Amino acid sequence: MALVKYNNNSISAVTSAASIPSGALTLIKTLTASSSSTLSFVHGSNGVVLDSTYPIYVFKFINIHPGTNNKNFTFNLSIDTGSNYNVTKTTSAFATYHNEANSAATLEYRADLDLAQSTAFQNLGNGVGGEADECLSGELKLFSPSSTTFVKHFINVSQFYEQQNMSLNSYIAGYANTTSAVDAIQFKMNSGNIDSGKIKLYGIKDS
């Protein structure tokens, strides 16, 4: 996100608040879960923009809480405005974790989380705890989804309370192997509902 630095002279020269640049990150849409089976962002629906307006889109996950314990937070993409969420993806994944008892900690490649030319939903958080104080937060960046020339790259970082009383930091990146424009994205648990939490969609201007 662009940072703008002002000195005393530049501030005194401003004649209206509208003259001050608002920065590069623009909020497009917020979805709030309430025992929701899915949360979907579809271009052209309910104020959602997911086209060439922005070259980078950022989805921020805030306190995503599964309806039941030990669930996987997942996503998939669509090239037909949400009729199907089944875009072919190839990804890689690694994770770090540390438990509350200070008896287990590691950094490891997670072959069980990666995909190889698969249309399946991609895990962003594996084994999220469902107790009252347990949840997941993080973000997913999606690059040039409207391109009809290149595949669509994405990068995810998620931090969550794993159901075995661990702090787990998950890193997943890959590409949607399609040159069709991606115009919708859906988030859900691998089973059950998203009990609560918010997902915010931003566009990054001039990037």
Image: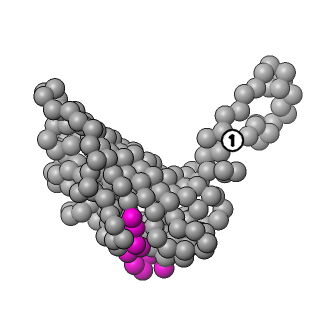
Nearer to the camera, 142 or 134: 142
Magenta residue span: 80-90
Q: Is residue 19 left or right of residue 31?
A: right
Whether 186 is drawn above or below 132: the answer is below
Q: Amino acid at mark 1?
A: Ser
Whether residue 62 is visible here, answered yes or no, is: no
Q: Is residue 85 magenta?
A: yes
Q: Residue at x 45, y 52 (%)?
A: 155
Q: Quick one: label 1, few (<14), some, or many (20+) residues within 10 Å?
A: few
Q: Residue at x 61, y 41 (%)?
A: 1
Which residue position is annotated with label 1?
22
Q: Residue at x 52, y 64 (%)?
A: 152
Q: Is residue 200 left or right of residue 207?
A: left
Q: Main secondary structure of the magenta part?
A: loop
Q: Is residue 79 left or right of residue 16?
A: left
Q: Is residue 112 magenta?
A: no
Whether residue 69 is visible here, answered yes or no, is: yes
Q: Residue at x 20, y 55 (%)?
A: 71
> Quadrant of residue 122 in the image?
bottom left
